[in-house]
Image (tube, rainbow, N blue to C red):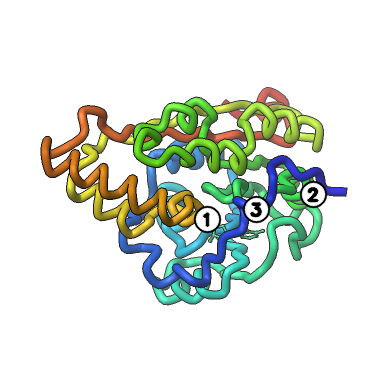
Amino acid sequence: MARAMGPSPTNEFDYDTIARQYDRHRRVGGPFIAPLARLAHDVGARRVLELGPGTGNSARGFLDAWPCELVALEQSAGMIAHARSKTIPGRWVRGDARELPFRDASFDMVFAVLVLQHIPEADAVIRECRRIVGDGCAAFVTAPRDFIEHHPLRPYFPSFSRIDLERFQPEGDLLELMQSEGFAETGLIAVEAEPQPIDAAYLEKIANKFISTFHLIPDAEFQSGLAALRAEIERKGRLDEDMVWRSVVVWGRTRHAARNGCA
Ligand SMILES: C[S@@+](CC[C@H](N)C(=O)[O-])C[C@H]1O[C@@H](n2cnc3c(N)ncnc32)[C@H](O)[C@@H]1O
């Protein structure tokens, strides 16, 4: 039986409704691609599965860093249609990460970028990952607790941190789950993006709700936070604090590196 790790209401989010505008404020790749490629290198991953690839930005970045046979499993038909239109090499499959339609040990690596916060049953996902990875690894990119708690926008949107603390599983819990589901060696890799000014360009991304958290904030709070932020940016040009986006890669290998002969 799957163990829900976060309350459900804030996890509900329909990606079909935003698939066409998703890429407007998103780029290919990200600072987590290098650690994912290193993990792939360490296990010599040839067959790789990405869970919840969305419109394929992480898939594209990963393939550039680590060419491989990629399968991408996504539950939103709208996101898949958009990803397919970008002709990223790989096979796109519609499905649910909690019940993978693949044989045991059919992949060398599985990864997911900012997906588990949408799935309260993280244990079911991790169990499935352990089943379909043979001698290899799994990696989940997520938001660390500390980043959510001290998010620079929380003075403007008081619910921001609460919403994300409810839906993002603590990285330590995910690590423990990986151990209990049978990953022999596990670890955390902290990742940090280049600082970005919170200025008029950033304000436009927020106004377009470029991350799902903004869709989950009550509308009145969102509008008043946006107005306050706009007034501050018009007055000063940018906020004093930059946005330094942080994430963490929670990884597990099915065997110890020493036994594998890996670095
Ligand atoms: C925040 S987006 C991340 C997309 C992509 N990984 C990226 O980094 O751009 C989360 C994605 O996970 C997908 N997703 C959510 N729950 C899922 C599930 N149970 N199985 C498969 N995909 C899921 C959503 O449809 C959405 O495309």
Bin the neighbour count of mark 3 within 10 Å (Cα to Cα): few under 14, some 14-19, many 20 and up: few
Q: Are marks 3 and 2 in contact (CB under 8 Å)?
A: no
Quadrant in which residue 42 is drawn:
top right
Q: Amino acid at mark 2?
A: Arg
Q: Which residue is mark 2?
A: 131
Residue occupying the far top of the picture: 258
Front tag of 3 and 2: 3
Gap in angstroms between the C-alphas marked 1 and 2: 20 Å
Q: Which structural element holds mark 1?
A: loop
Residue 69 appears in view: no
Residue 180 lies, in percent from the top left, at 81, 32
Q: Amino acid at mark 1?
A: Cys
Residue 36 lies, in percent from the top left, at 51, 40
Q: Residue at x 35, y 32 (%)?
A: 152
Q: Is residue 30 left or right of residue 247?
A: left
Q: Which structural element holds mark 2?
A: helix
Q: Nearer the viewer, residue 171 or 66?
A: 171
Q: Are marks 1 and 2 in contact (CB under 8 Å)?
A: no
Q: Which residue is mark 1?
A: 68
Quadrant in which the C terminus appears: top right
Quadrant in which residue 231 is drawn:
top left
Residue 163 sits above or below residue 87 on the image: above
Q: Which residue is mark 3?
A: 9
Front tag of 1 and 2: 2
Q: Amino acid at mark 3?
A: Pro
Residue 2 sits above or below residue 247 on the image: below
Q: Are marks 3 and 1 in contact (CB under 8 Å)?
A: no
Q: Is residue 30 left or right of residue 174?
A: left
Residue 171 appears in view: yes
Q: Nearer the viewer, residue 67 or 141?
A: 141
Q: Residue at x 57, y 74 (%)?
A: 77
